Image (tube, helix red, strand yellow):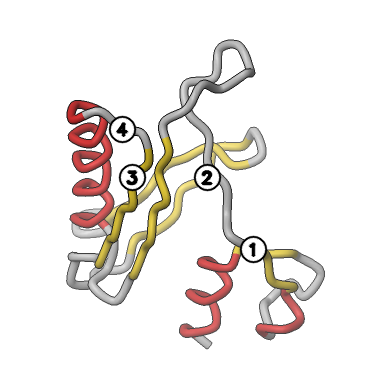
Amino acid sequence: MQGIKLLRCIFHHRRVSIRIPDQKAGAAITVYYTGFSASGKAAIEYAASILRDNASADTKLTILASWERISTSGVLAQSSTTGYVSGWTIDALNPNVIYPVALARRLLVRV
């Protein structure tokens, strides 16, 4: 499969391969920091640069990053979405699924 990029990940304990469309990379990423050291900011900037280089140019991400102690043992970091959208509101293939807002917006654009 020459020329086809695949993102391999684990989703609900199953290995999934997602085809990455051949689009111009260069997402717009804005990061807001709270409580980070200089080295911590550098690590997040590095991770954001990987996202920027691999996401399409029409992708816009806002990251609200805060450095604080996590009470769960063995957890290095955690993240969450800003909200959810029902599949039926975006005319998704499966209307009974609830999608994170960023993914729902992406699906809506492709309709």
Q: Farthest residue toward the right?
A: 96
Residue 70 sits in quarter: top right
- Circle 2: residue type: Val
Residue 30 sits in quarter: bottom left
Cα–Cα gap, marks 2 and 1 = 24 Å
Residue at the location (37% across, 48% down)?
Answer: 7
Cα–Cα gap, marks 1 and 4 = 25 Å
Residue that badge 3 annotates: 33
Residue 58 sits in quarter: bottom left
Cβ atoms at labels 4 and 3 below 8 Å apart? yes
Cα–Cα gap, marks 4 and 3 = 6 Å
Position of residue 92 measured from the top left corner of the image (x, y, whole percent): 67, 78
Q: Earlier along the polypeptide chain: callout 1 or callout 4?
A: 4
Tag in front: 2 or 1:
1
Residue that badge 1 annotates: 83
Residue at the location (66% across, 39% down)?
Answer: 12
Q: Earlier along the polypeptide chain: callout 2 or callout 4?
A: 2
Q: Earlier along the polypeptide chain: callout 1 or callout 3?
A: 3
Tag in front: 1 or 3:
3
Position of residue 101 measured from the top left corner of the image (x, y, whole percent): 58, 68
Position of residue 38 measured from the top left corner of the image (x, y, whole percent): 18, 30
Residue that badge 2 annotates: 16
- Circle 1: residue type: Gly
Cβ atoms at labels 2 and 4 below 8 Å apart? no
- Circle 4: residue type: Phe
Cα–Cα gap, marks 1 and 3 = 20 Å
Q: Secondary structure at mark 2?
A: strand
Residue that badge 4 annotates: 36
Cα–Cα gap, marks 2 and 4 = 33 Å
Residue at the location (72% across, 74% down)?
Answer: 87
